[in-house]
């Protein structure tokens, strides 16, 4: 065995090159720092000569061949003790089986040890390398096969990556099944893939790695019901269903990139050209030219901007206007709630530029034209902004999730984000690395900077999930709460002086709707805002009404006080004894809890001091509806018996579906909101969680008798029920 050990200090060190490589054109001795996470396309060809098999006497030559494929440059001042590894002359694609090469910062006092024997050069990975991961791992010296910690690596984001123990055996099985015949069994012929590759290369674009590995996808998902679509999209590019439209003349939508975002957009276009994902277009305009824009994205408490291709304009004939979509249900953070268990460990895997990993079928390229800097381009990859692509990409995500679940791993996926949980830290880390190996094997790139875990506090899809402290909770991060509160204040201050831009209101209420997933009761204070937007039609500016301003005044207190209290799993004390309510449209209302009960006629309620949420209010006919009366009975029962069930989760039985949904979601028509808010505040006062369940009218006989003022018959039925319960318990 022959190894190369290169000592390293603050000044950095550069490996020597052979004379042939030193004279070769394009040899990158001058290192270029790329943005974090940026990669370079792998070169093709053998490592040391065409078809050269190393012999015993060739080890020294092979060492230099591999060593010359890299160059080392010192990190910039202030970066700490890191080395930046960049691709130089030569080719080492065989070592990583064709996987992408990525620059990494490795914190160690020595450049890692590489096994560069003939075994590695023939295609077997050397210790410390990952063969299919988008981010390759280098083992710090000294390497010990008995100490797994020596196999971990830290990149620029301080992420530790380790080889999956289960993957090598799985990979061998997949490679044996990954044949041309298996791909063609899905309906995609090899000559079709070759034609698509030729089309991509003819315009100077880069062939997607998914296209090159379509046969691997056919092997991995051979039993999945959607495998035909997945393989076809990977091999020949994806498309979207559209209806034909005729226009008088091609459209040209101007970009809406502000001066403050122009530099970021220029960097993005330069990156896309460098990656060969876009290419200059000719002057033909079969459809038109779409716009470029910037969208805000909150991450780690900071607002970042992401370029998007705006295919929503023109509204009548644009790309999105032509797309025909069926309804689709996506996964959400609520699916992650179901996986949580107290004390479990969570991991998250994020794909890098997931959409841009997928090629577009060549017939859709003309529809993806845009202009920047006086130059027109066409896009050969799946872009941000096309409304069909989330549903299309979710089909790949579902297949990956199903594959992981088939391995016995609880997994949730939403587009390019994957979430898993395990009972131990070691199991969670193995899950994460197995998923990293799989998606990299298929041709996706992993964003190691955004991969997290194993942890017991983690943010997934914008929600902080926690499994520590014997209870599982979900909350909005403090930075996001501050951002939402600050935005609400700005809108409130502006609304008192003049109308507010519609886009600004839609953005705020979208944020509030997102936060209402985990902020208990917040949805009660967003209903009137959504009604205002719906009533305003398509006006560009909206005058905010006093009721909506009142809700905005309350939202800050609600979001800070009740954040994280909506989703609390495994609340220990649950009252499952009989607790039911009922209302009669003409007689009254009633309810019972254990041996307690109440009944009131509507005439009695009318004689009480009227509150703004009481039924039968003048000018509010909705308050006389049976759905409203059923909800009022629930509020009355909680007010009456709240102190007896304080700090508990209460199962309440309701025979009205409308009232049940309103209590479960804290959401209802505007006329119901005052009553729902009072019910919510009463639950907060006594620290009660209501768990409404449906009960048929026949089974809800006792509460029904009370609502009809049939007290005598209720006593007879009630006494009989309790006698039967005591007899059943004694048996």
Image (tube, helix red, strand yellow):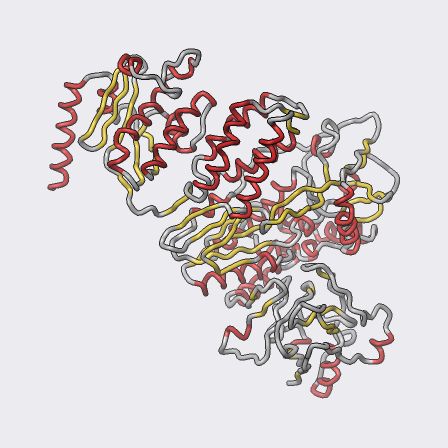
Residue 356 or residue 194, whichever sits in front:
356
Locate residue 315, reporting x and y percent: 72, 28
| Position of 525 relative to 139 (above/below) | above
Q: Quadrant of the C terminus?
A: top left
Locate residue 505, reporting x and y percent: 61, 31
**Residue 393 seen by the camera:** yes
Residue found at x 68% / y 52%: 357
| Position of 511 relative to 159 (above/below) | above
| Residue 185 placement, left or right of 340 | right
Locate residue 373, reporting x and y percent: 85, 44
Residue found at x 35% / y 47%: 570
| Position of 449 relative to 547 (above/below) | below
| Residue 64 placement, left or right of 248 | left
| Position of 234 relative to 27 (above/below) | above
In the figure, residue 452 lies in which quadrant? bottom right
Residue 114 or residue 375, whichever sits in front:
375
Residue 449 or residue 219, whichever sits in front:
449
Residue found at x 33% / y 38%: 688
In the figure, residue 721 lies in which quadrant? top left
Q: Quadrant of the N terminus?
A: bottom right
**Residue 408 seen by the camera:** no
Locate residue 169, reporting x and y percent: 53, 67
The outermost residue toward the bottom is: 57
Q: How many marks?
A: 0
């Amino acid at each position: 065995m022959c190894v190369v050990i290169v000592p390293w200090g603050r000044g950095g060190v550069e490996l020597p090159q052979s004379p042939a490589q030193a004279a070769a054109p394009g040899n990158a001795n001058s290192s270029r720092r790329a943005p974090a996470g940026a990669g370079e396309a792998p070169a093709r060809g053998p490592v040391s000569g065409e078809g050269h098999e190393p012999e015993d006497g060739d080890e020294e030559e092979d060492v230099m061949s591999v060593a010359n494929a890299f160059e080392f440059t010192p990190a910039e001042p202030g970066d700490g003790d890191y080395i930046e590894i960049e691709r130089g002359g030569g080719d080492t694609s065989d070592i990583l089986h064709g996987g992408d090469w990525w620059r990494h910062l490795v914190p160690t006092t020595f450049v890692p040890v590489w096994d560069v024997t003939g075994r590695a050069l023939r295609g077997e990975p050397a210790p410390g390398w990952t063969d299919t991961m988008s981010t390759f791992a280098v083992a710090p010296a000294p390497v010990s096969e008995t100490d797994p910690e020596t196999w971990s690596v830290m990149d620029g984001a301080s992420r530790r990556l380790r080889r999956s123990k289960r993957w090598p055996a799985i990979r061998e099985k997949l490679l044996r099944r990954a044949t041309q015949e298996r791909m063609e069994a899905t309906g995609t012929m090899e000559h079709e893939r070759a034609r698509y590759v030729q089309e991509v290369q003819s315009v100077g674009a880069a062939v997607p790695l998914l296209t090159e590995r379509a046969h691997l996808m056919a092997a991995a998902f051979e039993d999945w019901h959607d495998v035909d679509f997945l393989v076809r999209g990977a091999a020949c590019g994806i498309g979207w269903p559209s209806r034909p439209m005729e226009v008088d003349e091609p459209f040209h939508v101007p970009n809406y990139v502000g001066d403050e975002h122009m530099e970021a957009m220029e960097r993005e276009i330069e990156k896309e050209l460098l990656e060969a994902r876009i290419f200059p277009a000719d002057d033909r305009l079969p459809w038109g030219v779409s716009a470029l824009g910037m969208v805000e994205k909150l991450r780690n408490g900071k607002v970042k901007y992401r370029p998007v291709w705006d295919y929503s304009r023109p509204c009548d004939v644009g790309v999105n206007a032509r797309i025909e979509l069926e309804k689709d249900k996506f996964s959400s953070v609520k699916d992650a709630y179901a996986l949580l268990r107290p004390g479990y460990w969570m991991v998250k895997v994020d794909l890098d530029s997931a959409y841009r990993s997928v090629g577009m079928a060549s017939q859709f390229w003309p529809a993806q034209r845009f202009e920047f800097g006086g130059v027109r381009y066409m896009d050969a990859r799946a872009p941000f902004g096309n409304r069909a692509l989330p549903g299309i990409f979710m089909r790949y995500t579902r297949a990956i999730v199903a594959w992981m679940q088939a391995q016995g791993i609880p997994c949730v996926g939403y587009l390019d984000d994957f979430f898993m949980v395990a009972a131990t830290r070691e199991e969670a880390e193995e899950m994460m690395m197995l998923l990293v190996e799989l998606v990299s094997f298929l041709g996706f790139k992993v964003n190691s900077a955004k991969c997290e875990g194993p942890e017991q506090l983690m943010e997934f899809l914008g929600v902080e999930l926690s499994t520590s402290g014997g209870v599982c909770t979900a909350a909005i991060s403090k930075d996001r709460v501050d951002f939402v509160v600050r935005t609400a204040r700005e809108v409130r201050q502006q609304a008192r002086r003049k109308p507010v831009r519609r886009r600004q209101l839609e953005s705020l209420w979208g944020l509030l709707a997102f936060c209402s997933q985990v902020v208990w009761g917040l949805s009660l204070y967003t209903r009137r805002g959504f009604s205002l937007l719906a009533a305003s039609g398509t006006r560009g500016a909206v005058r905010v009404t006093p009721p909506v301003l009142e809700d905005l005044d309350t939202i800050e207190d609600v979001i800070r006080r009740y954040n994280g209290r909506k989703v609390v799993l495994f609340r220990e004390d649950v009252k499952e004894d009989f607790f039911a309510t009922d209302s009669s449209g003409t007689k009254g209302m009633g309810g019972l809890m254990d041996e307690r009960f109440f009944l009131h006629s509507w005439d009695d309620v009318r004689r009480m001091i009227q509150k703004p949420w009481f039924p039968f209010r003048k000018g509010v006919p909705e308050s006389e509806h049976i759905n409203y009366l059923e909800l009022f009975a629930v509020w009355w029962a909680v007010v009456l018996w709240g102190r007896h069930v304080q700090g508990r989760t209460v199962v309440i039985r309701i025979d009205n579906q409308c009232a049940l949904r309103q209590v479960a979601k804290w959401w209802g028509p505007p006329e119901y909101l005052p009553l729902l808010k009072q019910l919510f505040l009463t639950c907060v006062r006594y620290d009660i969680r209501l768990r409404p369940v449906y009960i048929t009218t026949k089974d809800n006989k006792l509460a029904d008798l009370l609502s009809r003022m049939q007290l005598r018959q209720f006593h007879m039925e009630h006494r009989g029920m309790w006698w039967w319960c005591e007899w059943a318990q004694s048996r």
